Amino acid sequence: MRATLARAAGLVAVLTAAGLLPWLSGKDPALSLLRARSAEQEPTPEALAAVRADLGLDAGPLGLLGQWAGGLLRGDLGISWVSGTDVLPSVTAGLRVSLSLMGAALAVALLVGASLAAPVLVRGRGTAGTVAAVLAAVPEFLLALGLLIVAGVGLGWFPTSGWAGPRHLVLPALALGVPAGALLGRLVADALPSVLEERWVELWRGAGVGRVQVAAAAVRRVLPPLVPQFGMVVVGLTGGAVAVETVFAIPGLGRTALGAAKSQDLPLLQGTVLALLGFGLLVGAVCAAVRRRLLGPALRDAGLTLPAARPVRVPPAVPLALGAVLVVVIGWGLLREPFAVDTALRLSAPSAEHPLGTDALGRDVLARLGHGAASTVGTATAVCLLGYLIALAIGFLPNLASGLADIANAVPPVVAGILVAAATGPGTGAAALAVALVSWPPLASHAAALAQEVRASGFLMAQRAMGAGPLWILGRHVLPSVAAPVARHAVLRLPGIALALASLGFLGLGAQPPSPEWGLLLDESADYVERAPVAALAPSVALALLAALAVSLSGTPARGHTVPPRRRTTRATV
Amino acid sequence: MTPLLDVRDLVVRYGAATAVDGVSFQVRAGETVGLVGPSGCGKSSTAAAVLRLRRPHAGEVRFDGLELTALSERRLRAVRPRLQPVFQDPYGSLSPRRRIRAQIAEPLRVQGRWSRPAGPERVAELLDMVGLDPVLGERLPHELSGGQCQRAGIARALASAPELLVLDEPVSALDPSLRAGVLNLLLDLQDRLGLGYLFISHDMAAVRHLSDRVLTMRAGKIVT
Amino acid sequence: MPRSDALLSVRGLRVGFDGVDVVRGLSFDVLPGEVLALVGESGAGKSLTARALLGMAPRGATSAGRVLLHGSPVTPADWGRRIALVPQDALSALSPAHPVGDQLALAVRSVQGLSRKDARLRAREALSEVGIPAARSGSFPHEFSGGMRQRAVLAMALVNRPDVVVADEPTTALDPATQDMVLGLLRERCSATGASLVLVTHALDVVRAHADRMAVLYAGALAEYGPVDRVLARPLAPYTAGLLASLPSGPRPPKTRLPVVPGRPPAPGEPAAGCAFAPRCARATDRCRTERPEPRPLDGRTVACHHAALETT
């Protein structure tokens, strides 16, 4: 009930923000509109005022919101500022394309997920493995670009752009579906071993139920609690779709939204964002229905919670080695000059002077990677710290935390990035704000869980009984038990946040040229991949290393328990 | 003579369910009152209400003549040291992150009675009193056995210099061969310090052995 | 010592982890229709032994020795049909995602190969045998009270009419009255079908009330093994004697100090040589510290102690 309220409040908040976009952005579109509408007309103050009155921009924030909401109720999404056509047909056309793409991606995801989870089910232990972990961490834009270059341009197997038939669907669906599928597979595969160690498995086996039936029952047991997370993966597809549609030039909703944000076509942006959010909400509702169907009357019970997944130990050498490679590259690059343009040396191959070659303007790629990392990682660190502080502040108010987290979870970073960029204009700050807005919920829920665990413990009751005040208990016991594990968790999320920032940069929603931000580098490099492959691939490899680092770090237990393992009798399992 | 603890018509509710339904009893100084009954009969809720870890819905809890249910949390803090709990789970009742010595010292610090060298001396004395080797003071709870942890929990309770201990299943989680030692310790401490005990357990034999009087609870009421 | 009438016989059972044996060479028999209690403290190897009886070993465990049921080794094909397990903490032992009746019916179908309909009928029958109305068989475990869940677990273990039921501390979390009720029901159902019951517990009063014979385990080895009335009336192994003496029950003036077994139970692998109980034993001699006592027959039971003897007083 509370979750429903929180979602409703979240929807109202996001809709309000969308409706207020023209006012929030503080920009005056009158001039650009005037130019777009008729090139001859002089931009006299009268003409501009006429445009403003025509658009209703002079009505103030509440008036704007009222107009937009009123139109919404009549099924009128307004008129595009740029093309002057109705927004609704563009949105429905984009939605149709995006839905087919996401449908195909979902099919890919289910296949990938099932094939990753199956071996774990058969063995009864282990994990989906490193490959799954890396696939789940690779951002869609990187995979899309990789597929485009290798299978599209290099091998020529599939068309690389446009939307004209099933063959056009293959590469985008793979780019969008594989990471989602790896994530789905991991969710199931991580949950299975601990479910297979639950008591009932012993009872069932001991009562004669066969191995196959137990495995089937374990899947049945695992799925309902995961359905909401599946829903989030599907909602995440909307974010991924923006990048994939952009890379493959597919006229879908995501690309439309991105274009509208970049050209300040706010009515079109409002319409597309509305459609994206509506899709997300629909998915959430479908998931809730599926879960109810699966669980039946067990809905309100333990059937909802899964036993804690066992952390998968990754040898510390792996993240250390990856980190070392990145540090060396970045350090080396930092010593070099990233902005020196030398048109004589455009797209040169690696040499002693330019170890990774040069880009289209003759700038040193290694230097740009190094300097770009400094800004990407620096921004990511700031975002991480902000998320950590929010998590600590909100973690002690678990109800608020879960409500807000629900909203933040439902918005993929890219959609947040589009909204923020539309309001403030694209830039490093906008990207950082967007990622910060959606990256704190996992930290906050971790903090809330830990705080709850500590507060419920016997030793805290002893504290109250000895006469300790609330500040003593908070400062000496609750905070120390929460702060350190959540800080570790926050550090582990750093590479993931850097990737999210890079994806916004790639889409042009973050840092702007000539900044050497990694996502931007990747975007630029795509243009000259055939002429200077090493220089072009360097940013991709760096991002892939970052993704691998994120994965290997997350293998070390992030959801640390506050309580160290006790001496216990050995529990036997089948 | 005023009884040390005087509970009258105590009512504790969890939402719509009534866990304790009009319970009255007294514990005099130096006396052990046993409270037995099946799971869910309201024993532990009674303990929590007596310790004011949960505010009772109705009734009175008088400690040494002082009515606790009406006190504000702040005024209560001055009284709390005089009645101390010992919990069932020996590990869960200690912080997993701090050394035993620091945890036994904590009541002294909380209550503003910590000083050097008297503080550390008092902790050493308490360790000795509950039969723990001083070396164990430097350990973390998970490095100790259940019996040793329970002794540390008792030492921490004693650090507040209480007059009443509320013992909620203090030996149920211990291995059988360790129970007798902790029960003996409780008897010794009572002799030495004149403590009153409210001893809650479903182990009839242990309750009979330790108690001067035994009360039986069923469905939130005292039946004998 | 091997008995020809044994239904289940265990010889030289060892179970360990990483080269350290937790169960260190156990031999005992389960007779047809009897209730045998396996008694011991935490770390004594009770749960590992219970699972070893079914041939279930935890991950990473190594085991040696023989467990013969009807003269042949136990395999997973015997589970449910010949030997069944009631796990610890029966309150969480049912799948939360499946109706109780379905769980039983699945066990019936797996073992007896009945049709879906017949299996469902048998499941309802098994539930009503433990006092759960057949109409409730479609309910999920969380819709049951604690006592009903407990009984449903018993019904599931018994649904295929096994010859031996192994119950691993099935009632530890319960208060004495409920414990008694559940164990009474378990015993009654076993005797109704003629099944033997191996009852793992750490509570001597449970043993006294419900078992015919008992095997006292200390540090993974047998300390004393024989009829309950004999062992409890006159324990011969120092560990059993110490444990019994330290109980607050029995004729003893209130508030007297109880005799204590000094020290604490050993951790796995701790007693490197000799008798595992020697460090806590008042009668320990050099021989106890170097030479491990073999179980030997004495006064109608089996005792593993160099010093145990029938003192004539």
Image (cartoon, rainbow, N blue to C red):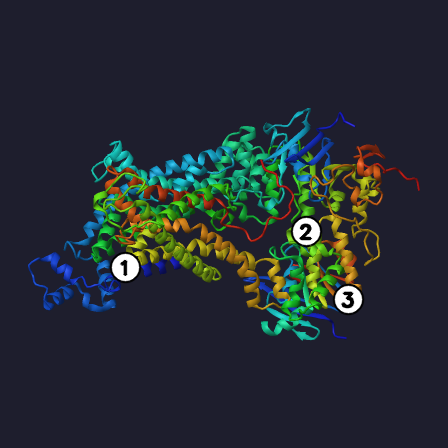
Report the number of numbered marks: 3
- Indicate the chain on which mark 2 is placed: B
**What residue is disc 2 on?**
B144
Side of C58 where B169 appears, left or right: right
Element on which disc 1 rests: helix
Q: Position of residue A461 (x, y in %)?
A: 61, 62
- Indicate the chain on which mark 1 is placed: A
Instruction: Give the mark nearest the N terminus, 3 or 2.
Output: 2
User: Can residue B169 be seen in the rendering of this structure?
Assistant: no
For the residues labelled 2 and 1, say whether their Cβ atoms are less than 8 Å apart: no
Residue B193's disc number: 3
Element on which disc 3 rests: helix
Element on which disc 2 rests: loop
- Residue type of the residue flagged with mark 1: Ala
- Of C219 and A379, nearer the camera is A379
Side of C4 where A391 appears, left or right: left
Front: mark 3 or 2: 2
Residue A18's disc number: 1
Q: Vertically, is A349 above or below A476?
A: above
- Indicate the chain on which mark 3 is placed: B
Q: Position of residue A474 (x, y in %)?
A: 54, 64
User: Can residue A71 be seen in the rendering of this structure?
Assistant: yes
Q: Residues within 10 Å of mark 3 (few under 14, many from 20)?
A: few
Residue at the spot x=26%, y=58% of the render?
A425
- Residue type of the residue flagged with mark 3: Leu
Which residue ends up furthest to the left in the rendered image? A40
Q: Position of residue B191 (x, y in %)?
A: 80, 64
